[in-house]
Image (cartoon, grey):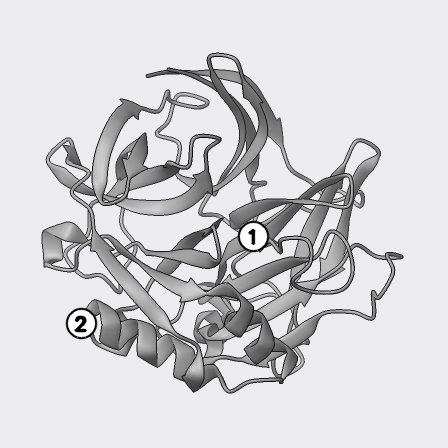
Amino acid sequence: MQVEVEHVTALRFDDGTPVRAASAVVAFGGGWLVAQDDATHAAWVRPGGVTPVRALPPVRGLDTFEEARGTKALKPDLEAAFVVPDGLRRGAGAVMLLGSGSSPARVRGSLLRPPGADGDGGPVVADLAPLYAAVARRLGIDADLLNLEGACVVGDVLRWFQRGLPDAGVPTASVDVDLRALLGALAGDARPADVPVTGERRYDLGSARGVGLAVTDAVLLADGAVLVSAAAEDTPDPRDDGPVVGSVLAVLDGGVVRDRVDLPHVHGAVAKVEGLGVVEHTVDGVRLLATVDADDPTEPSLAVGLRVRW
């Protein structure tokens, strides 16, 4: 497997403010929706510009959250995004965003449709805390160690990836969540506690510079395998951030790593890829759009075009 960077774009809203902490990217309304993990609105990226789209209501009157202001604990930490398959919910082009877990602020789901689309009435938001608790039980970890950072639709389930921290004894892993039941819970037609959670898998992605690699996002490939981004974060505690010393793409067949390749540096630094979206499948591989978190609310996140060849 080979990978090359085709383009890099700094993401800014039309008013010049930076797109912060880009944590997921998904096709949306003829463009891309980029989640910001420290904000209640996402960025709708289209050829004509970048506009905000509300994903959640304000939290205690706030729409952005920062450690320096003492509001980091309130952030919704939307880390996973996927397109809802046709036929499961009314309204074409719907996407779902999901929080990472680990605290009451981070256990919500949000269903969005492109502004102006049929059925668009703003985000449909639900507290899914009982589902997150079930995921933690399935993974065999304490709920405050959840860090669900990526997801993709595989058949009739959502494969939801736990980043974890391999070096601290919290494996990178995934579970399968019944997709129809999940959407029912979000719509209020079913209880979140009743959503089936199955298929726990653990992955050994190796290491970079001696630090274990853990999944940050995932997309489904044309052959049914799953392509993941993974980062090696040098920290002793799963709850704490640390410097990312390496990042890779890997192809997973079930629980087996079929292939792996180091990601090129972007602007001279390790690319902390937080989001992946498939632009197109090609004869010899796939083109991806990746989002890179700058880890600084004053700096714009990056949209990086990647060409992968098998």
Query: Residue at horizontal 57%, vertical 55%?
Result: 36
Quadrant of residue 119 within the rendered picture: bottom right
Asked whether residue 248 appears in the rendered view, the answer is: no
Quadrant in the picture for the C terminus: top left
Q: What amino acid is found at the position of numbered circle 1 in the picture?
A: Phe
Asked whether residue 242 appears in the rendered view, the answer is: yes
Q: Label 2: how many residues lie within 10 Å, few (<14), some (14-19) or many (20+)?
A: few
Measured as percent of width and height from the top left, residue 198 is found at 31, 67
Q: Label 1: how many residues lie within 10 Å, few (<14), some (14-19) or many (20+)?
A: many
Query: Residue at horizontal 87%, vertical 60%?
Result: 118
Per the image, the residue denoted by label 1 is 82
Quadrant of residue 8 within the rendered picture: top right
Q: What amino acid is found at the position of numbered circle 2 in the picture?
A: Gly
Q: Are marks 1 and 2 in contact (CB under 8 Å)?
A: no
Residue closer to the observer: 5 or 117: 117
**Which sits earlier in the primary sequence, circle 1 or circle 2?**
1
